[in-house]
Amino acid sequence: MLLASGAQAGVFDDDEARKAILDLRQRVDSSRLAAETANQKLAEELRRSTDDNGQLRRSLLDLQSQIDNLRADLAKQRGQDEQLARDLAEVQRRLKDQAQGVDERLRKFEPSKVTVDGREFTADPTEVRDFDAALAIFRTGDFAAAQTSFTGFVKHYPKSGYGPSALFWLGNAQYANKDYKGAVANFRAMLAATPDHARAPEAALSIANCQLELKDSRAARKTLEDLVKAYPQSEAASAAKERLAKLK
């Protein structure tokens, strides 16, 4: 009986142990399965995280590329803007220079105020040029050419403010060329037009000189006497008095 009881106890112990082992194995397997499942989930999460990180990294790289492109575009645009600003400034400078050039060219054709022999008047640039040219010729001593130039000036500019002065110098050129009658005519024309001209006394004295050259002493005396009466304070009047004394 004791042996039987011991055998039964041994069987019982073996069954219990086997059951315990099976339970343990089952728990281990369950734990292993759970661990594997957890590992798989973790691996999946890690893979997903890695994929997400890769996508995020690609997105960041793409964004950085876009930013770099924008910066390059902005730099290019800034450079273009600066070039446009320089081009605009250059165009404005050229327009200003052209406008000034046009103004200068226009001024060359616009009348301007001049003062000759104490008389102020307005004259076209061509009048100024032609009168100055004729006077320059006279001063070189080429009286024939000066006579031609002043004769052309008087005909071309009959209403010019230079008229009285032109007649005066024309008369002097004619006197130098011994064209006394022509000189007298032009000196008288000057006196008739502008008796108050600064050179009027000289013109009257020149008429008397021409008359003396023409051997017309009576006319010369009359001219000198009229000169003294009309312009008593002038240097020409003093010279006229001296010549009148010699004519007596």
Image (cartoon, rainbow, N blue to C red):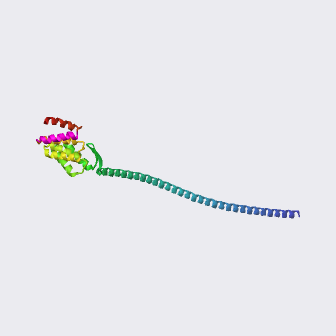
Q: Is residue 46 left or right of residue 27?
A: left
- Residue for point 14% across, 41% down: 220
Position in image of residue 175 (x %, y %):
15, 43
The answer to which of 23 and 94 lies nearer the viewer is 94
User: Which of these two is toward me, 58 or 78?
Assistant: 78
Q: At which x and y percent is residue 79?
A: 44, 52
User: In the orientation shown, which residue stands out farthest toward the right?
Assistant: 1
Which residue: 18% across, 46% down? Answer: 188
- For the residue pair 51 and 13, the one nearer the viewer reads as 51
Q: Using the rendered image of the protein, determine whether residue 8 is visible from the camera's viewpoint.
A: yes
- Return the residue nearer the eye: 114 or 11: 114
The answer to whether residue 11 is above or below residue 227 is below
Question: How far across and down, in percent of the image, does residue 201 sit?
Answer: 21, 41
Residue 10: x %, y % from top left: 83, 62
Image quarter in which the C terminus is found: top left
* Residue 217 colored in magenta in the image: yes
**Residue at point 27%, 49% (across, down):** 125
Q: Report the residue at 31% width, 52% height from top.
A: 106
Asked if residue 132 lies left or right of residue 99, the reply is left
Q: Is residue 152 magenta?
A: no
Residue 133 in view: no
Main secondary structure found in the magenta portion:
helix
- What is the magenta range? 215-231
